[in-house]
Image (cartoon, rainbow, N blue to C red):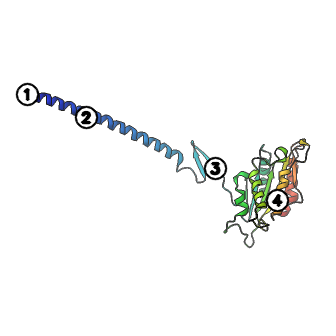
Amino acid sequence: ATLVSLTAVAATGTLWYWQTHQRRRDSRNDDTETGERTVQDERTRVTSNDEAPVGEVQLNGEQTEQATHRRVLTPNTITIVHGSVTGTCSQLAKDLEACLKEKHLNQDRTIQMGPLEEWDWWDELLNHDEDNDYPQEGSLLPVLLILLPTHHGGSWSPTSTCLESALQDLQNDWRIEKFPLKNKLQVAVMGMGCSDYADDSMGKPAKEAFITFKKLGAQVYGKKVRVGDDAVGNQDRVLQAWIYHDILPRL
């Protein structure tokens, strides 16, 4: 009888231990699964918010609009780009855009504006969208209006070197036809610089871009590059001369 009792007690103890251990293990599994679901739900909420509009990114509860542009070589477009560092060329680009819209040039054309770095210039100037880049009957050649600052020693600013590199490659690559932009693009260039440096560096990037676009076959507005001078603050007056003497008569 004593042996049977001991056996029963042992069996009961074993059953209690197994049940307690199983409950603890199930509890840990539930906590782990709940935590995984919480993390997964949080990731889903942050990275794929169904309420975020197309073309915008949801980040920490804020929506950041992504830049979307038509191709530079698309007919019936006017593209305004700048390599602003201090904000001067950026403001001039905004003033230029406002002026063109005041003249109602956006009625039969698309006007777009942004920093140079928002475009892939090798792709934009060399590759074609078969459906959109070739002018159709009655369409207008695309126009590219560029505002370039002058960096140290007359070099291109870091915000402009994307265009500089593309132009150099287009000019020097023997595999590319001699005039790749002929009958495809119209271009106008304005520069910004500072005469306080007392050298010939003021407006040098703009002048180089002007010459290179011409060599590549683009139709270039104006006989020379107009350059604003930070030292005297004449950029608004130079911009108006650029608009009314070089740009508007050609549009």
Could you tell me which secondary element the residue under label 4 belongs to?
Answer: helix
Residue 10 screen position, x and y as percent: 18, 30
| Circle 4 Cα neighbour tier, 10 Å, few/some/many (<14 / 14–19 / ≥20) | some
Could you tell me which secondary element the residue under label 2 belongs to?
Answer: helix
Residue 195 screen position, x and y as percent: 90, 44
Specify which label sits upstream in the sequence, 1 or 4: 1
Toward the viewer: 191 or 62? 191
Say which amino acid is labelled 4.
Answer: Thr
Q: CA distance from mark 3 to mark 1?
A: 83 Å
Using the rendered image of the protein, determine whether residue 10 is visible from the camera's viewpoint: yes
The residue positioned farthest toward the bottom in the image shown: 137
Q: Residue at x 58, y 44 (%)?
A: 59
Q: CA distance from mark 1 to mark 2?
A: 26 Å
Residue on which the image places disc 4:
212
Q: CA distance from mark 3 to mark 4?
A: 33 Å
Q: Please indicate whether residue 44 sits to the left or right of residue 211 in the image.
A: left
Cβ–Cβ below 8 Å for labels 1 and 2?
A: no
Residue 127 screen position, x and y as percent: 70, 64
Residue on which the image places disc 1:
1
Specify which label sits upstream in the sequence, 2 or 3: 2
Q: Please indicate whether residue 73 sits to the left or right of residue 3 in the image.
A: right
Specify which label sits upstream in the sequence, 4 or 2: 2
- Of the two numbered discs 3 and 1 in the rendering, the one whose residue sits closer to the viewer: 1
Q: CA distance from mark 2 to mark 3?
A: 58 Å
Residue on which the image places disc 2:
18
Toward the viewer: 37 or 137? 37
Residue 32 screen position, x and y as percent: 40, 39
The residue positioned farthest toward the front in the image shown: 174
Q: Please indicate whether residue 75 sits to the left or right of residue 24 in the image.
A: right
Residue on which the image places disc 3:
65
